[in-house]
Structure formats: C-alpha cells, structure tokens
Amino acid sequence: MTQTITPRVRTLVLLLLAVTGILLAGAGPASAHAALTGSDPQQGVVVDKAPTQVSLTFSEKVAMNDDSLRVLDPQGRRVDTGKPSDISGTTYAVRLRGGLAKGTYTVTYQVVSADSHPVGGAYTFSVGAPSKTSVAVGGQDVGGGVVGRLYGLGRYLSYAGFIVLVGGGAFVLACWPRGAGVRAVQRTVVSGWVTLTASTLALLLLRGSYTTSGRLGDVFDLNLLGQVLQTKTGAALVSRLLLLAAAALFVAVLFGAYEKRDEEEKRDLTFGLAIGGAVVAAGLAASWAMAEHASTGLQPGIAMPVDVVHLLAVATWLGGLVALLVALYRAPARTPVGTVAVRRFSRVAFGSVVALVATGIYQSWRQVGSWSAFTGTRYGQLLLVKIGLVVVLVGIASVSRRWTGRLTEAPATKAGGAATAKETVRLKEPVGKGAVSDEGAVAEKGSAGGKGTAGDKATAGGKAPAAGGKKSGSGGKAADGDSRRAAQLARQRAAVDVARQKRLRDADPGRFGLRRSVLAEAGVAVVLLAVTTVLTQTEPGRTEEEAKAATSSSSSSSSPASSSSGAVTLDMPFDTGGQNGKGVVRLDIDPARVGGNEMHVYVQRPDGRPFDIPEVKVAFTLTAKKIGPLPVAPDRITTGHWAASGVQIPMAGDWKIAVTVRTSDIDQTTVTKNAQIG
C-alpha cells in the first residue's frame, strides 16, 4: 500500500513547490492598492524658481515614516528637511532647503497603502534647466528582492495552514467524528496549526524590512519590529497569534478528550466544539480581512464580513478535501472513512461552493468594477485565471460526487477475524524452524489443550522429559519460547487481518475512483491557492483604472496653462511586442514655436514608473510643405527621461511627430501624433 501512495503524495508536494516557486518568482515587486495621482512640482516640469516644498497626492491614505519622501539633488545629496506632513488626507509634503541650484532633482517615495502593501517610485523635475544627474530612479524594488519573495512565501503558507487547520477540524466534527482517533488526520490538522503559527511569526519579523529597506539583515531589527506593531497589519498579525493559542486548545480537546468519549458524550461535546471552533476560525479569517484589500476602498463595512465568509468557505471546502484525501489513503483498515462521512462532506462542500461563488461575485465587482479591467489589468487577468481554476475544480468535484454515489461500505470481516483459506498469507515463523500459515498457528495453539505446542511434541520425540532440575529448566525455557512465539504469531495474524481488510476495502471500484478524483481536486487546489496568494498582492483593477484616470485628468488640467504659454504635451502609448514591451511616451515641447525649442521625452511603464530603455529617437515632418523628417536625438538625462535643447522648427504648421522606442536589441516600434507648432 505504501508503494502505491508514496509516489502520488510526492507528486502532489512537488507540484505545490513548483507552482509556488513559479508564481511567486514571477510576481515581482508587489503592486499596491494606493497609486500616485499627482505631484507638485509635476513630473518632468522645468520651473524658473526653486520650490519650497514637494507634495505628492495618492489615490488613498498611506502610511509614511521619516524617510518615506526624499528629494535628491543632481549629485544624489538630500535637500529635503524635516518629516513628511499630511496636508489633506491623501496629499503629503516635505520641505526643501533654500537656495537650491539649477539642475535636475529626483523625488523618491516609499509608502505603505491602506491595504498593507508597499508602493514606491521616483520622478524628476528641474530648476532653471535640465542637467545630468547621478541618481538612478529605475529599479524601485519595493516589496521585492529576497525579503519580498520570503514574505510572499510566508503569505502562501499562512493561507495553506489556515485552510488545513480550519477545514480539517470542520471535516472531523461535521462529517467524520471517528476521524478524531485517526493518527494521520490528527497529524494533518496539527501540521496546519504549526504552519500557520510559524508563517505568522515569520511575516511579523519580515514586515518591517518588507515595507522599508528590503534588506534581509533588518529582519531582526527591534526598532522596525516596534514600528510594525503600531500598524494595522502588525495588530492583525498579533491578533492572529493570540487566536492561534485558542486554536491550539481546540485541537487538543478535539483529538484528546473528544476522541475518548463514547458516542452519546461526543454528541454533547460536538455542539460546544463547533461553536468555539467557528468563533476562532472567523477570528482568524478576520485577521486578513481587517488589514488587506477588504479593509479599504469601496464599501469596507460590507466587504470585510463578505471576505470572512469567503475565506471560511474556501477553508471548509479545500481543507476538508485535504482531510478526506488523507483519510482515503492513510486511515487504518479498522477505522476506514465510511460512505456516510463522504456523503456528508459532499453536502458540506456543495454549500461551501455556493457561498464561495456568491461572495466571489461581489468581491470581483468591487475590485474590478468594469469589463475592460478584466483583460486590461493584471488583477483582472489573474482573476480570470482563478475563475477558470475554480470551474475546473468544480468539474472534478462533480466527478467525485458521482463516485460518492457508487460507494459501498467496506466488507465486514469474517467471524472471529480469521482469514479464509484463499485469503491466507504465508508468513515465515520467526522462532523455531520451518514456516506456518495463519490456520496452522491456530491449530498449533489449540493442540494439547493450550498447554503445549506441536513444536514441543516434535522436540520431545514422544519421550518423557529428563528428571530433576533439567526438567524444570527445560520446561521454563520452553514456556518462555512458547509465549514469545505466541505473541509473534498474534502480531502476524493481526497484520494478515489488516492487510486482508485493506484489500477488501480497496477492491470497491467506487472508493478507488473517489481517491483518484479527490487527488486531482487537491492538485488543482494547490495551484488555485498560489494564484490567490499572488492576487492578494496585486493592485485591484478598479484602483488601477481610477489612478490612470486621475493621472490623465491631472495632465489634461495642466494643458491649458501649458497651451497659454505655447507648450505642447503629447502622450503616446506604445507596444514593442517583446517581453514587458508596453509603455507610454510623453513628449513636451516648450514653447512650441518657430525657432529653438526645449524638448523632453519621458518613457513610462503602464503603472507610471520610469521605463529604463536603451534608445529613443524623434523625427518631425510637415507633410503639407513636404518638410522632413527632421531627426532629433535627445540626450539621456536619467532613467526614463531624455532631453534636447535648441530643437529647430523652421515653419509653423501641423507637424507629425514620430517617436521611435527601442526596448531591447530587437524590439522597437514607432508611434506618431500630430501637433500644431508655431
């Protein structure tokens, strides 16, 4: 039996590790719920007079520390003074030193959004005229690196531990009370508690470094830990640890006092355990709901209870599935998981799926908001993958339900537990010579009225034993040998009986089919959990689209001022077709007149971060007068920023401006737009 089970279990574990590695490695830095929607001075602007402060506006309230907002001069020295201040709830400012020299300044920010995820970025503005800067604004690896990957793994393990702990306990209480005495089920539920506790402690230690420096050495920084404990996420993690202490008591009673009670006493204790376990499970689920996506944004008062129900439904279904899988493969023959238990779980799982679908529809509407966000944002794309996996899981579950309907109870053992002649397993006798069958052992024990054995008679050869002390000594040794051999034969008979019962139980085709389908369900559930973990670290589609709209609105609101001075600003999306080839080019021409002009080119990723690409080229063409193309090769100022001075426009008119963007050695594209110059 072990040789059949082990490869399948090993395959499931390898699948879990592989999917976790792929998804968490591919997740990159965690996107956040908050997004930068405005700044003063604006990105890329050239101001005549040095500002006294820099302010940033986000899509929601964020948490800041003393170093969350920094301003650096062209040599990389800090020019900000004091702590960042909250101006209007979502706008934060930091004061600047007086007498700033001309040149390009870099603004960097690293904050924590209301749903616990870190977000960071950088941009530049110039005083007087642009200049080269030694500050690199690319590679803002907020929430990434080794610490980010460890934090993501900790989140995955915490979800997995919660599911196994809650779902396994619910399976035993609601479906299979006899399972409380099965060692394999006990180990499974306890391992869920251990995994959730260990991962929660790890998240608490990693949190400070995850949201600030990203250095592995800061994990045990007590100052950072103290700051974490004062945040909403820190409070949620500490609450989870306290609830896990209550969960430990629940597990101890479930597999201790509860398992030892008779059936009538178990029924009385089940109600109390169910109430207490439900309260603890809801509290554990709330530790996620109170600190993540559900706690901020649209309708948080409704979203948090819905999120708790969603998590409990997932745990009851998938955690019960894990417990059922363990019971089907590892439960001893004397206490097999019966048809009644499997059918009970089938009904419980169906109710969980209904709750999961209902709460999932609400969460999808709340986090995505529009059909375009399903395909146009990373959150929407991951959500589509999750929905597809749930559909596959439900399809496999329907197959499991059909196998459940075909289940029969395991055949009862024969009277007295003795094997029939056809079921006899030949076993070598460990004491004495030769081999005996199970029936031979029974016959042997029955001979001589239980006082002697066939082996004793053969040894004596039918003669009387020697007289005196030798007789007594020989009799004592023979008695000791008989008792040892009788014990060994008893163990052999028990092993034969257990093997026979397993063989008869596993001969049921319904049980065999159910084991296969439940194993397939568990494999899909592993992938689904990994996708869900990445989804919880991704900026919701609704927020991403609202941030883009706010940024566009901010840009358009600044256009009249620019046009009054003659400046032209053009935004041109591009896609080179390679990996990470999408972005936006912003072209600023000032004062957009005949003669010399200042030109700035900003290349950004779709989320607004600077895009570090190898080359940008610009060409001007006046088609009506057959002038051009007039090429311009701007100089690279910093990551995502190019500039050129003295760009000559020889004649007023409707100019076609072509920008060629190269993102790799082979991936490039040209985008065009017309603008009135002069």
Image (cartoon, grey):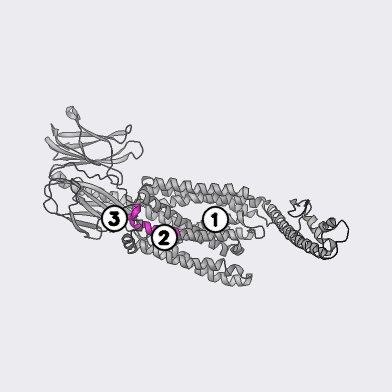
Among numbered discs 1 and 3, the one appearing first in the sequence: 3
Going by the image, does 290 lie left or right of 328? left
Neighbours of disc 3 within 10 Å: few (<14), some (14-19), many (20+):
many
| Secondary element at image label 1 | helix
Quarter the C terminus occupies: top left
The magenta stretch is 198-218
Pointer 1: what residue? Answer: 322
Q: Position of residue 454 (x, y in %)?
A: 83, 57
Spatial CA distance of label 1 from label 2 is 24 Å
Q: Is residue 678 visible?
A: no
Going by the image, does 65 lie left or right of 312? left
Neighbours of disc 1 within 10 Å: few (<14), some (14-19), many (20+):
many
| Secondary element at image label 3 | strand
Question: Looking at this view, is 124 or 444 the one in front?
Answer: 444
Position of residue 141 relative to residue 184, above or below, is above
| Secondary element at image label 2 | helix
Q: Position of residue 616 (x, y in %)?
A: 25, 35
Pointer 3: what residue? Answer: 111
Pointer 2: what residue? Answer: 201
Is 209 a magenta residue?
yes
Going by the image, does 11 lie left or right of 26? right
Neighbours of disc 2 within 10 Å: few (<14), some (14-19), many (20+):
some
Q: Is residue 630 visible?
A: yes
Contact, mark 1 vs mark 3 (Cβ under 8 Å):
no
Considering the whole magenta stretch, tell me its main secondary structure.
helix
Is 114 a magenta residue?
no
Disc 2 residue type?
Leu
Question: Looking at this view, is 100 or 369 the one in front?
Answer: 100
Among numbered discs 3 and 2, the one appearing first in the sequence: 3
